[in-house]
Amino acid sequence: MLNIIVCVKAVPDPKEACNIKIDPATKTLLRCDVPMVVNPLDKNAIEVALQLKEKTEVRITVLSMGPPEAGNIVKECLALGADRGILLSDPAFGGADTFATAFTLAKGIEKTGACDVILCGMASSDGSTEWVGPQIAAFLKLPVVTMVKEIVETGAPWWKVKASIDNGYRLMQVKLPAVFTVTREVNSPRALSFSGIIKARKKEIEQWGIEDLGVPSESVGLKGSPTIVSQLNTTESKREVEFIKGSREEKAEILVHKLIGTGLL
Amino acid sequence: MAKLKNNIGPVWVIAEQIDCRLLSVSIQLVGQARKLADELNTSVEAILLGNDVERQAKELIAAGADRVYLGNAPDLAFYHPEIYSEIIVSLAEAHRPEIMLIGSTAMGRELAPLVAARLETGLTAHCIDLVLDENRNLEQRIPAYGGLLSIICPERRPQMATVAKGVFITPEPDESRSGEVVEIDVPDMVSDRIKTLEVVIAEPEGVPLESADIVVAGGAGAGDLDGWNKIVLLADTLNAAMGSTRPAVDEGWTELTTMIGQSGKMVSPQLYIGVGLSGEQQHLVGVVDARVMIAINNDDRSPVFDQVDYGIVDDCREFVPVLIKKIEEYFEKKVTC
């Protein structure tokens, strides 16, 4: 039996993320009710686990850290086919940077018990950071391969994976237990099925707070974060747009003249 | 080397080589580290791990390093996460750098978080500027939500950041600079739990993004693969390099290597044409000093129009084929005249 933990993050829907703005006066984020969804690359991570489960005996635990509302995305992962859903949620966890987030998730993973494989999406769509996967590995003292684009072999205890590097790939052999972060190329995530949603209704999400993890409050959330946001500024554009108007043909015609004007055609 | 006049540790750059060639981002980071170190009145030190790379250590000195810790061994020829991070962590514990900079390369993106976690310090991803604030903390700037965030790591050291190629300029090499190359003992550690079996590096196809005069970038507005291919055809027609945004990569229309922006590539074309994208900072910070910028988007309130010279409000799926036809007509006339 292979125990797989998939770490997922609730992010503002990337399709509507451009509606999140910084209020120039208060310098705070205006979220404009953008809905929270499963981070896109985390769906690829879940899919790796689900495909393995079709071939062999696997128990999939989905783990997320976030506010109580993030329970919805854990529920969605249960509906996709995960066996167990855990949400790390506590006001003390709030304001965490990637270091404190990875630490908290690592403590959560330790509490779940035996674990062979930890999967994460390669990056989060909101912060564009890629640190949580490798930092979980560092905290748990496990090997890690980031940017995995193909799972080549899933033997015990060795996995063979191809990981993206600049203009190519590296073929890595890794001994389990290990952490892998995956890219979009690794698979095509499945959609939710109706029967999955029905089955997930009966599954309960476990919610763990700071006391469940038994960690000091200085090590999590804002207090446990080495980095802080010192300023939030709006950027000013140095350009002023000239809209090209007319029928579609006319607009294309005028734009071609503008392109010719650059001297680059 | 001169003794430090204060107790501020050195500014470090984790240099990277592939096939014994120093990456330009490493040279650029040494240049920026020099500026920061001069302001802090401290030194610049680089770490270089590889095999047969003594000459590359000299290049780092010519770029502005005062000292290079050189790990020279066959086992170090290619990046290995455990061996590399072990060496860097133990050097950092011994020499206490104030700042540690790493390129946002495949290596840097894996190595930096491993090192930061073990040194129990902060790490900022893909910075687009690094300056010192009034308390001499490193202000690490990243784009976010139509604005700019400044991140600091006030209490722990080193202050760590990754930076993409092209964010800082390449300093002119000064062969007359003197510096010290310190050969480090390479620990005899063979990692038994993670092995690199093979490394395959391919020549990139098409016009390289970083050096292209014209860049066409497509986003989620392409709608589907068919719409995306129309934008690719526009790029081909203009002999332009094709770039993308994160949503286009997430949709699976293009490879991650085409992504422009904070966590992708930095481009500085003469002409940039953004098609079906909303102009998020994470993307547009990757477009540096373009002479002319054009956007095509069906929403006249799209923030992309605040950041370009010419705007076309239209459905890109309909407009792009018409534009391609007009460009081809111009090329035909040009040939026949």
Image (cartoon, coloured by chain):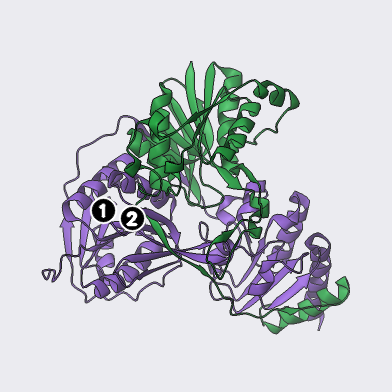
Question: Splitting the image into 4 quarters, where does residue A251 fall?
Answer: bottom right
Q: Residue at x 41, y 70 (%)?
A: B168
Residue B175 versus residue A204 in the image, above or below: below
Question: Splitting the image into 4 quarters, where does residue B154 fall?
Answer: bottom left
Chain in purple colour: B
Q: Residue at x 52, y 20 (%)?
A: A59
Q: Do labels 1 and 2 touch, CB within 8 Å?
A: yes
Amino acid residing under circle 2 = Cys
Residue A252 versus residue A175 in the image, above or below: below
Q: Is residue A191 left or right of residue A43?
A: right
Q: Disc 1 versus disc 2: distance between alpha carbons? A: 7 Å
Chain in green colour: A
Amino acid residing under circle 1 = Asp
Q: Residue at x 57, y 75 (%)?
A: A236
| Residue of label 2 | B20
Q: Chain of mark 2?
A: B
- Please provide percent x and percent y for residue A166: 48, 52
| Residue of label 1 | B52
Q: Are marks 1 and 2 on the same chain?
A: yes
